[in-house]
Amino acid sequence: MQILHDDCLNAMRQLPDGCIDAVITDPPYCSGSVSEASRSAAKGQGLRSENINRFGWFVGDNMGTAGLVFLLRAMAFESIRLLKKSGSMLVFCDWRMVPNIAPAIESAGLRYQNMIIWDKGSMGLGTGFRAQHEVVLHFTAGSPEYYDKGLGNVLKCRRIGADRYHQTEKPVELIEQLIRVVCPPGGVVLDPFGGSGTTAVAAANLGRDAICIERSAEHVATARRRVATEVQPDLVG
């Protein structure tokens, strides 16, 4: 189990070819405004005020669309080198950014395989058809293998409440559902945008190994603490 304090592209370049079974990651969404100028100036896109007050904002999530596309395309190029030929990459995404992100990642050589919907079970902010879901884009490196064939592409899992470690933290239970499908027991999951370590915790719970990369020193410390305290010692590789 590795929690690396680094830029994702730099850290990924240090890893050997074909060492990863699955990439599962939750990158910046960069989708909170109606124009590029207002997006770049935003201080809390899509977050409730109490979470902004508690966590502040974080580096990277007020990039423009071009910046996000450049970053994720570069990440995808490294991912296809690292993935085994049977491997998958799952990328969380806001629905507004799908038309930009999907072709950018495809252009790195990955196949756009499916779209997974996370049903959070309750509505978010806004008016009129208030959002209750997020999207996970599924890409494959070659001929994919699946290790749990009993899961559909709509996953129901309640969102995390106010007691959280990260501004956009995902539930461990949700990440576990994804891991079961695309990573074999004993396999290795890579999370290039590791945040507070949810992917590492989920992987350890299921008997998988994980490499999580995070550029924020504060979140790296949180991730390492979570792995040390939330995971049974015999499950940490």
Image (cartoon, grey):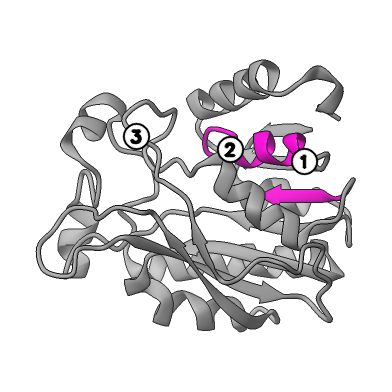
Dot 2: element:
helix
**Quadrant including the N terminus:** top right
Dot 1: element:
loop
Where 205 sits versus 145, above or below?
above
Q: Give the crowd class for mark 2: few <14, some 14-19, many >=20 residues within 10 Å.
A: many
Q: At label 3, which amino acid type do we have? A: Gly
Question: Which residue does the numbered mark 3 point to in the structure image?
Answer: 161
Q: Quadrant of residue 197?
A: top right
Instruction: Indicate which disc, 2 or 1, sits on the residue closer to the N terminus.
Output: 2
**Residue at the spot 29% in from the left edge and 63% down from the top edge:** 31
Q: CA distance from mark 3 to mark 1?
A: 24 Å
Q: Which residues are magenta?
A: 187-205
88 vs 194, nearest the viewer: 88
Q: CA distance from mark 2 to mark 1?
A: 13 Å
| x then y, percent, for residue 203 | 73, 41
Q: Give the crowd class for mark 1: few <14, some 14-19, many >=20 residues within 10 Å.
A: some
Q: At label 2, which amino acid type do we have? A: Thr
Q: At label 1, which amino acid type do we have? A: Leu
